[in-house]
Amino acid sequence: MIERPESAVASIAQRNLEGYVGFANLPNQVYRKSVKRGFEFTLMVVGESGLGKSTLINSLFLTDLYSKDYPGPSLRIKKTVQVEQSKVLVKEGGVQLTLTIVDTPGFGDAVDNSNCWQPVINYIDSKCEDFLNAESRVNRRLMPDNRVHCCLYFITPSGHGLKPLDIEFMKRLHDKVNVIPLIAKADTLTPEECQLFKKQIMKEIQEHKIKIYEFPDTADDEDSKLIRKIKEQMPLAVVGSNVVIEVNGKKVRGRQYPWGVAEVENGEHCDFTVLRNMLIRTHMQDLKDVTNNVHYENYRSKKLAAVTCNGGVDTSKTKNQMTRSPLAQMEEERREHVMKMKKMETEMEQVFEMKVKEKKQKLKDSEAELERRHEQMKKNLEAQYKELEEKRRHHEEEKSNWEAQQRILEQQKLDASKTMEKNKKKGKIF
Amino acid sequence: MAATDVDIFSNEEKRNLSLGGHVGFDSLPDQLVSKSVTQGFCFNILCVGETGIGKSTLMNTLFNTMFENEEASHYQNGVCMRPRTYDLQESNVHLKLTIVDTVGFGDQINKEESYKPIVDYIDTQFENYLQEELKIKRSLFNYHDGRIHICLYFISPTGHSLKSLDLVTMKKLDSKVNIIPIIAKADTISKSELHKFKIKIMSELVSNGVQIYQFPTDDDAVTEINSSMNAHLPFAVVGSIEEVKVGNKMVRARQYPWGVVQVENESHCDFVKLREMLIRVNMEDLREQTHTRHYELYRRCKLEEMGFTDTDPDCQPFSLQETYEAKRKEFMGDLQKKEEEMRQMFVNKVKETEAELKEKERELHNKFEQLKHMHQEEKRKVEEKRRDLEEEMNAFNRRKVAAETLALAQPLKKDKDKKN
């Protein structure tokens, strides 16, 4: 017996503690466990060759992901769009991160770039599918999360606007992965040009209803101020560099030009630090959460709907089915079918009974009819018999009467003749 | 997998890279923690024990607050589960605490079914979570998780051993939930008796194969304290919400004529140890164990029951789609077969009845043929009789005519005679 509360939400009572209990320590417990588990993150970079993707990765993670020993994809010749992933393990401050970088060499490099986004989409979908299958196994083990958490899209710094390929790509990927557009090689734009370019890009993004990654609102005032600042700077204009140069006695990463040094980590030169802070230091977890709660769930519900609805186009029905699991769906269908069968059974029974009744009735009727006729004929015969009897009796009567009469006549005649004889004998003596 | 015109190179080997500076992802755990804190935590405790053993008092003492306290009667028909949810907050941490009480446990004369409502409740919580997880459109991140994270089993302080009801119940629960056995009302047992009692209980649990929750010893930060606490199980606790003045402080205690039992005094009882282990050190581990061990076990059994397997007869792993499609095909085929069967049954029925009715028709027909024959016979007889009669009548008429003509002739003769 379970006493159910009226509603799980309504009967939650607020209680004030009158002393230190200790569950404020929960966050520390969570912290420890997460450090022990380690973290994973998959970052995808997409853009035409030569936009500085590999350099940016190296700058972001302050490491040589692509080096002489492990040459990046850009140094390889390819004919079609490839999707390449490299997995590295990095440690910092006791925290272990398994970083997967996914590169797309050949993107946008061909003369005809139709469908060059397809391999990318396929890659993202296949990772989601792997996760879905792992999640749906009967025996589940710790599932590695290889889904793409973030896609950095590199825009050519033309200064004018987005190219049709850019728009096509972002439109097709914005509901599959978190898309963060970046202006590459931003050191070719002056600050004014950069501002105009950013405005233009954001305008076009809104026009085409492209959903790029949005920073979540926080309750914290400080944080929301920062977030608003970042939002104003989107898309971020970045510069990457593998080279360390000395500027004013400091060693900085930068690009040495005859006219000066463009410093990577200088906020006035480019938005690189904003990108790094946002991507790694503050919003990495949120990127993973959005991937898990939004993009993956989208993929999953589409996939499962296709399996259960089996192409059913009835929208009212499918809406109802969405709130159930496929198994519950099958249960429901089974129940419906049982009811349908019952109905069919009773209908068929009814029809059957009716037909049988009809036939039986017909049989009865013809039986009755024949009975009746038989009765009638019998009566007829009986009447005839009776009539015959009557006639015979009548005839017999007549006959016996007549015979009696005849006898009397005969007797009379005999008597008369006897008397005459007597008279004759007496002689006619007069 | 991927389209055929794409090559996917995957370097599955993980390289260890060293960083040339401070990147900043060491803030990841903090990001995770701040997200969890924003979401809030939830924790569900199940208290199993006889009526009056001190479950509600202990909860009040543990959480330093007055939860609803109706004293239960001893006359319940069966065991009744009573879940109550409370919203607690400590510094910036929100905790949604659900306490499930087993009302009427141990009061019935026949206690064979006592464990059932408890097991059913736990299973229902698992089932609800599983159903949510299997939905097509699901929202797991704001799902109110009702799964029981910890079962506190209250043992009567008899001083001898576990009751058979205790063993039976714990054995039924140990694969479904984390169990921490507690000796209740420990202020009725002396120290030496307590020591013997604890040893007896633990050995009984071991010999009966009851798996109680072991505090984890694989995390460096807490290994020491956890392993030492493991040796103190089961905790002997005393609960009290009343405060007594001891020295110059007000402490929670129970006042007896012979002294004051202080709840938070570690030499008086193990309350502090319980609070430490349950709340301050291992709360997260309890939640994790429930999700990764007990829930997964339930899920695995449930899915296997429904006929899901991970590999097909050829030992190739199924993809989810294949599994569902196969299930669905089987299911549809099943339904169709049922339909066919029913139709077939009807067809047979119809055939049978038709044959019956035809038989009846034939009989009827025969009967009337017979009657017709009979009737015709009779008719013939009547006709014969009629003819006979006709003949007789004719004969008679002829005689009559003859006689009359004769009679007519005779009077002439008489007249003739008379004339003479």
Image (cartoon, rainbow, N blue to C red):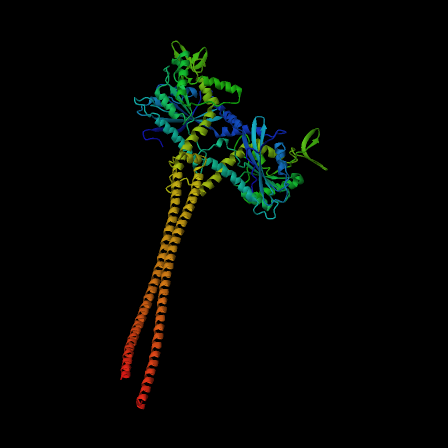
Quarter holding the C terminus of chain B is bottom left
x, y percent for residue B288? 51, 34
Question: Can residue B176 be seen in this snapshot?
Answer: no
> Is residue A425 left or right of A279 when viewed as pictured?
left
Q: Nearer the viewer, residue B375 or A402?
A: A402
Q: Residue at x 33, y 69 (%)?
A: B382
x, y percent for residue B119? 54, 42
Q: Nearer the viewer, residue A128 or A39?
A: A128
Q: Residue at x 53, y 22 (%)?
A: A219
State the image quarter where residue B374 is shown: bottom left
State the image quarter where residue A140 is shown: top left
Judged from this view, the residue extending furthest toward the top is: A259
x, y percent for residue B167? 57, 44
> Is residue A249 left or right of B53 when viewed as pictured?
left
Question: Can residue B69 be seen in this snapshot?
Answer: yes
Q: Nearer the viewer, residue A9 or B214?
A: A9
Look at the picture and state if A373 lies above or below A391. above
